[in-house]
Image (cartoon, rainbow, N blue to C red):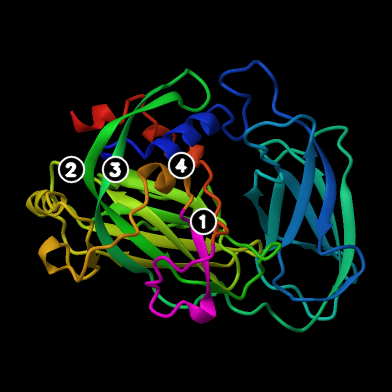
Amino acid sequence: MLSRRTPPLALTALLAAAAAQAPGRASACSEADPPEFTLTAIMPAAGATSVPRDTGILVTGEPSYETAYNRLDVVVTLTDVETGRVVPGRSIHWSSEEATAAWYPDEPLLPGRTYHVEVIPASTGGIPIDGSTPISASFVTSSALLEPLAFSGDIQVTVNAYDATVQECEYPPCGPASNCVDVGTRRALRARLDLPAVVGGQPDAGQYRALLYFNDEKTPDVTQPNLEGVVETESFRIAMAEALLPTAGQTVQLDQELFEEDFDYTPCFTYVVWDPAGHKIQTSHCLPVLTQAQYADATDAPALAQVPSGTLDDTATASASSASASDDALLSGAERNPIDAQSAGSGCTFGSTPTTPGAVFVALAALLGGLARRRSRRQQRQ
């Protein structure tokens, strides 16, 4: 059973917008057909040499019209020019912002060989679309593999009590929430997370794809390295996720509210990162059990306090923090800031991070659509 809590307002709005443009079908708010795509770019580029043997192939398309979710599906045929053998592999959805698909081989390619790749747009069922123009390229492999995909450290967590903004919004049948009005504040707990930097693998324009899961009691098993990864959400009472675009060599800092529930639970965070070559890594961090009594005691404190991740007792804090951010800023992603991996230290770098956002917050309609309930933030308290 999913948590009785609705997702944060910003996530709810994005989910509603994305649900209207769910992958592989026309908008639920429109009779329009999904856009067709003209393939415009392929990587490795034609004539590339010294290509690592486990490199993924990236293909970008131009949609016939813009939608909120530009999913590009393709059929990829990679052939060993010397033997004529077609290399087995799999394609994954990579980016809806730039309508990009990725494909990677089941096994590393042979060294020093010439390969020819041809890509054609396809339906979501993997059937080539008649009349579509393919894009192709040939490249030569090296003897090397990509550097292993790896984290620079572990997830660091600090728990804070803060004043969360309560809003009432209108929820249209399609699209994001609108006409939101602040109607007060409520005391709540949030976890401030410093996610480790990612290095190695095959970053796309310096970035990877990632998911941050917030669950109770245990960590999810993510079996596929893409946004449609298989997660047994029905086994969790709290099941939320954020999609991120971490930059190579930089950590990401963000905040997640710890919901007040009518049951005790263990807040757990799982950070999963993958690249176009199909490499996937993940790391997890679980806090101690959060009881209803502890939540009430912590949120009764009049001042915002820093709580070490090893305890959820508000009386064990070191000092009050003056860096209280508004709930609106937290939910909109304004505090998702990158920190250079060389200067990250322990990950506790409050008030000294750059201002450029280090992660893009996007909707996970396919994974979390069932969480988007039309309830106001005020109704969460009832």
Could you tell me if residue 218 is visible in this image?
Answer: no
Q: Are marks 4 and 1 in contact (CB under 8 Å)?
A: no
Q: Secondary structure at mark 4?
A: helix
Magenta segment, which residues? Answer: 335-354
Specify the amino acid type for callout 2: Glu
Residue ID for mark 2: 261
| Mark in the foreground, 3 or 1 | 3
Q: Are marks 3 and 2 in contact (CB under 8 Å)?
A: no
| Mark in the foreground, 4 or 3 | 3
Mark seen at residue 224: 1
Q: Is residue 165 left or right of residue 317?
A: right
- How packed mark 4 is, by other alpha carbons closer than 10 Å (few <14, some 14-19, many 20 or more), is some
Residue at image location 72% in from the left, 32% down from the top: 66
Instruction: Find the distance from the CA under tag 1 to the CA under tag 2.
Output: 30 Å
**Where does residue 260 sit, x and y in percent of width and height?**
19, 44
Q: Is residue 191 left or right of residue 36?
A: left
Query: In the rendered image, which quarter contains the C terminus?
Result: top left
Question: Which is nearer the N-term, disc 4 or disc 3?
Answer: 3
Q: Are marks 3 and 1 in contact (CB under 8 Å)?
A: no
Q: Is residue 352 above or below residue 233?
A: below
Specify the amino acid type for callout 3: Ala
**Where does residue 170 sit, x and y in percent of width and height?**
41, 20
Specify the amino acid type for callout 1: Gln
